[in-house]
Image (cartoon, rainbow, N blue to C red):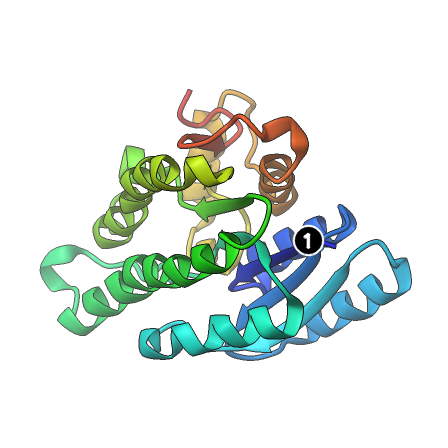
Amino acid sequence: MLNVLVTGGSRGLGLCIAERLVSAGFCVISIARNRTEQLEAAILKAESDALGELHFRAFDLMDTEAMPAFVKSLTKEFGILFGLVNNAGIGTSGVLATMPDREIQQLIRLNILSPIIFTKYVVRSMMGGRGGRIVNISSVVAATGYNGLSVYSATKASFAGFTRSLAREVGPLEITVNTVAPGFIDTDMTHDLNDMQRNQITRRSALRRMPVAGDVSDAVNFLFSEGARNITGTTLTVDAGNTA
């Protein structure tokens, strides 16, 4: 059974991705600071379904200095790592001119620095296996922009260059690297949207609806499938045609 790490996998989109990969037969290690009731229920369901496995290991991704030892411990416990989904992140909103410096620094650290350093050590584990898959979770606002999300958009836009360049670095090792860019979906990250904003997003979409978390997890699962073995260095947008 191939081992896959999903950061921010204790709730919301991350947990949905973890559950989808478990149903595809992967051994998924969900990484977050704390367990949640939703995660506990998902672990029990995974045990009952007996398709894949779901585990939880606590870690604070802001602690970049502890990452080498943490990844080493995961490899020792579970074996060679095959996949990584860089999903963890924060979506703090705010107009740049009035946004506290502390919040800007926190966004950049968790949304850019942490996944890059974490990926570095996971890739080292992947090198001992038969290829691998890396999926970075971005956002459509990385390409379109959105009022009050300038810093968040900048952090998500960074995945485009990271994905393309890393794909070339690790391609000879049969490791693919891609980005999934969801549109606005119903998660903790979008709970601040009011009805008017949701209606605007829906009207702007080609399909006249908002995607759901399951649409994004299906896209990630596809990129982990054999059918996606020759897809790397690209961004898959899941937004119901909002940016069409």
Q: Amino acid at mark 1?
A: Leu
In which quarter of the view is residue 110 placed?
A: bottom left
Q: Is residue 133 visible?
A: yes
- Foreground residue, 148 or 159? 159
- Foreground residue, 39 or 177? 177
Q: Residue at x 57, y 63 (%)?
A: 9
Horizontal side, residue 214 vs residue 206: left or right: right
- Foreground residue, 74 or 199? 74
Horizontal side, residue 182 vs residue 162: left or right: right
Q: Residues within 10 Å of mark 1 (few under 14, many from 20)?
A: some
Q: Residue at x 59, y 76 (%)?
A: 57
Q: Is residue 180 visible?
A: no
Spot occupied by residue 102 in the image (x, y as percentages of width and height): 18, 73
Spot occupied by residue 223 in the image (x, y as percentages of width and height): 58, 36
Task: Identify the residue at the far front of this view.
Answer: 128
Horizontal side, residue 96 vs residue 229: left or right: left
Q: Residue at x 9, y 58 (%)?
A: 97
Q: How many marks on residues? A: 1
Quarter of the image with the C terminus is top left
Quarter of the image with the N terminus is bottom right
**Mark 1: which secondary structure?**
loop
- Foreground residue, 113 or 187? 113
Spot occupied by residue 238 in the image (x, y as percentages of width and height): 51, 33
Residue 148, above or below 178: below
Q: Residue at x 32, y 38 (%)?
A: 160
Spot occupied by residue 133 in the image (x, y as percentages of width and height): 54, 44
Where is mark 1, residue-wise?
2
